[in-house]
Image: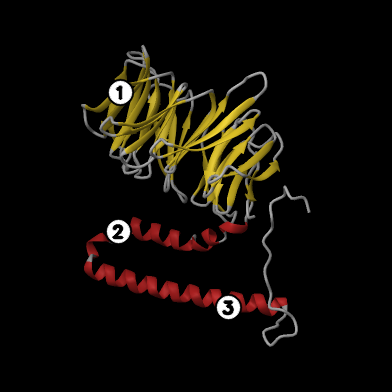
Amino acid sequence: MNENEPKKEQAVLPPAGTEESVSATDYWQATAGRFRLASRIFLALTLLFAIAFLSVRYDAFTYEGFFGFNRDLGAMTALADENDRNIYYTYLSGETVQDAYRGGVVSAGVSGAEIYAANGSLLLRVDFQMKTPRLSVSDSYILFYDYGGTDFLICDAYTELYRGQCEYPILSGFMSDAGYFSLITASKETLSRVLVYDSNFMPVMSFGRASVTVSAVLSPNGKYVALLGVGSAGTVLDIFRVGGKEKETSLLLYGYPLAAGFTGNTTLAVLTESDAYSITLNGKIRHNESLQGRPMACWISPDGLLVALEKDRFSGEGEILFLNKRGKVKLKHEFSGTVRALRLSEDTLFVLGNEQITAIRKKDGAVRLVFDCGSEAQGLAPATGGVRVFYPAQALRILTDD
């Protein structure tokens, strides 16, 4: 067996010749019976809890809430199958984009999008027309928008929730875990415009910006929005309370702005072409790391910042850095070649090159796996026990079990 291939999990049957020995058919029938019994017990306990809750809070009962609860309950078996599945979706012509969503996958193209559960079953298909589809995913919602166009759309796993249209072309979008979302658009009056909507799809902020705005990210709780823009002498970072008019914080940082993201409700990671920062809502710079190379790719998560640096363009020599949420460098790993995407999944860093994926252990930088993914791999997303690799018509799950 090729050691670069992901390991496949196998069912373990009781050994033959013992009192516990059964046929494969009997084994799976017994397993299925135990699962059905456990499901019935869980359903009974859930109903008892619902009855007890409604007896105290009858005012909390709504048709929409009950309908959503019923759909989530029906999807539980799909989520339970996450560990074993590659997910196959419709091949879409034109530009496509994919991401992980609630254990499954969302895939969007010029004519619409599909959302799949962890077991590969289709949950939702929505139709739209977007020349350059983009998406932003949170724990519960998905924002689809047309880069360079004016249309946007909000969905959850089961239904289309809202369709909207901006006055000017959309340049970027971001969806928060709280259901608040932001859009950056062009503008005739200013260099850019930022729009922020609440979880009921109502606009709560709209203002022009004198600078080109690169990023407008919201805190997980939806209470703050951080705007990253181009200033006359570097990067401008402005932080607002959502719905407020005055800035909570305004900072001028070194270098051209590249990316920003909340690592918690009160801390930000900011990446420029020359530096990486960890910054609090009140404007305190917890740490500033000068970069020894040109950023090629990055990823910001609650764990911190991953960035790939090109140190020598001719030799291809580079470096992968992992900085924790306090901005401190916890891993430096020498790397050669182009880096197209980075992801952190559990205790492993994944690096997508031109035709290979390299898995690097976070604690010591040891290479756990090199996988030949081919040139058609389009992106990565964290997955239980490994990573998902997106192709035009499938999301392949690669395991890193030692």
Q: Which of disc 1 and disc 2 is earlier in sequence?
A: 2
Residue underneath mark 3? 33
Tell me which residue sits at (22%, 31%) in the image: 244
The answer to which of 167 and 371 lies nearer the viewer is 371
Residue 62, disc: 2
Q: Residues within 10 Å of mark 3 (few under 14, many from 20)?
A: few
Report whether residue 210 is seen.
yes
**What amino acid is found at the position of numbered circle 2 in the picture?**
Thr
**What amino acid is found at the position of numbered circle 1 in the picture?**
Leu
Q: In the displayed structure, does residue 164 sit left or right of residue 358?
A: left
Q: Quadrant of the C terminus?
A: bottom right
Residue 125, disc: none
Residue underneath mark 1? 251
Placement of 66 over or under 201, stated as above or below:
below
The answer to which of 174 and 253 lies nearer the viewer is 253
Placement of 78 over or under 369, stated as above or below:
below
Tell me which residue sits at (41%, 75%) in the image: 44
Q: Quadrant of the N terminus?
A: bottom right
Q: Which of disc 3 and disc 2 is earlier in sequence?
A: 3
- SS type, badge 2: loop
Report whether residue 125 is seen.
no
Q: Position of residue 109 (x, y in %)?
A: 57, 35
- SS type, badge 1: strand
Q: Position of residue 66 (x, y in %)?
A: 36, 61
